[in-house]
Image: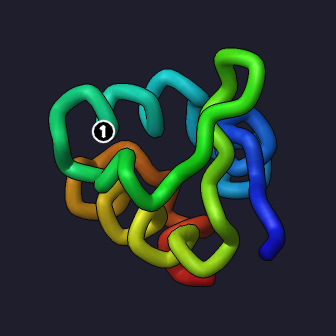
Amino acid sequence: MLFKSISDLARELGCRPRDISDLFYARKLDESRCHRLAGRTLIPVDYVPAVRQALKASGRLPAEAAAV
């Protein structure tokens, strides 16, 4: 299984890492789907569409990244 860090995913989607972290803290994303390694959250690539959708729903995703 492949994973992305919050920072890597934020860079890919064009948002801030904090935008993704805030969705986990607000329970908008399921933290049990992710792994923790050395204090970092690793997001499985098959969960990326859900993260993108949550960012879009919260208005934190730039318009061009939402269309991809």
Residue 16: percent from left, percent from top:
58, 29
Decide which of 4, 53 is in the foreground and name it: 4
Circle 1 sits on which residue? 23
Looking at the figure, which quarter contains the N terminus? bottom right
Q: For mark 1, give the secondary structure.
A: helix
Q: Position of residue 50 (x, y in %)?
A: 40, 72
Q: Position of residue 45 (x, y in %)?
A: 68, 72
Q: Is residue 60 above or below residue 39?
A: below
Residue shown at 46% from the left, 65% from the top: 52
Q: Residue at x 37, y 52 (%)?
A: 32
The residue carrying pointer 1 sits among few (fewer than 14), some (14 to 19) or many (20 or more) residues within 10 Å by Cα, namely some
Q: Residue at x 17, y 32 (%)?
A: 26
Q: How many marks?
A: 1
Q: In the depicted view, which residue is nearer to us: 66 or 24?
A: 24
Answer above or below: position of 47 versus 28. Answer: below
Q: Is residue 55 above or below residue 66?
A: above
Q: Which quadrant of the view contains residue 27? A: top left
Colour scheme in the image? rainbow
Q: Residue 2 vs residue 25: left or right?
A: right
Report whether 22 appears left or right of 48: left
At label 1, which amino acid type do we have? Leu
Judge from the rendering whether residue 30 lies leftward or rightward of residue 35; answer left or right.
Answer: left
Residue 68 percent location from the top left of the image: 62, 82
Between 20 and 29, which is closer to the camera in this rendering? 29
Residue at coordinates 70% horizontally, 50% vertically from top-left? 9
